[in-house]
Amino acid sequence: MNFYEGLYILDIQGKEDGLKEALTSVEKEIISHGGKVKGSQKMDRKKFERVAGELDAGFYTNILFQLDPAQIAPLQKKLKLNPVVYRQFYLQKQELAEVAA
């Protein structure tokens, strides 16, 4: 299992109270693919530099987790179907620093 840092841009426009539900759904998906969530960091809602549609801002969050490398592609495909996940980026880490959840 490798360590990963996932950056997610969430589309929770008009439903700010849905942030916790959105994060929980992403974390559950990681766990369902055999991963272990080590922590998360909520960054903030930010406006996009370039707007390419109706969405002009998104809520940014980092989730640190451990996952088998073969499961990254299936995880990306599954989260692509989730309407709350606007964008997702992954970075493989050597090891994770201690993070407060």
Image (cartoon, grey):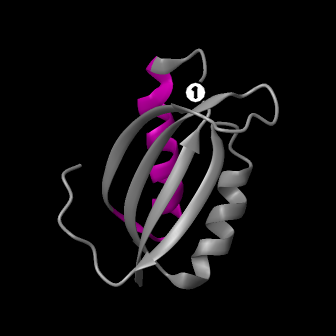
Q: Could you tell me what secondary structure mostly forms the magenta stretch?
A: helix
Residue at image position (51%, 43%) is 25
Apparent side of residue 43 relative to residue 73 in the rendered image (left or right):
left
Q: Is residue 2 above or below residue 30?
A: below
Q: Looking at the image, which residue sits at the far right?
A: 53
Residue corresponding to mark 1: 12
- Residue 87 pos. (x, y %): 65, 49
Residue at image position (42%, 83%) is 2
Apparent side of residue 96 relative to residue 11 in the rendered image (left or right):
left
The three-letter code of the residue at mark 1 reads Ile
- Residue 16 pos. (x, y %): 48, 19
- Residue 26 pos. (x, y %): 51, 49
Determine the image quadrant of residue 76.
bottom right
- Residue 58 pos. (x, y %): 58, 34
Tell whether position 36 is magenta: yes
Q: Is residue 71 above or below residue 99?
A: below
Q: Looking at the image, which residue sits at the far front?
A: 49
Apparent side of residue 45 relative to residue 65 in the rendered image (left or right):
right
Q: Nearer the viewer, residue 36 or 45?
A: 45
Image quarter of the N terminus = bottom left
Q: Nearer the viewer, residue 63 or 47?
A: 47
Residue at image position (69%, 57%) is 78
Residue at image position (34%, 84%) is 94
Residue 12 visible (yes or no): yes
Magenta stretch in the rendered image:
17-37
Q: Residues within 10 Å of mark 1 (few under 14, many from 20)?
A: many
Tell whether position 13 is magenta: no
Secondary element under disc 1, as helix, strand or loop, is: loop
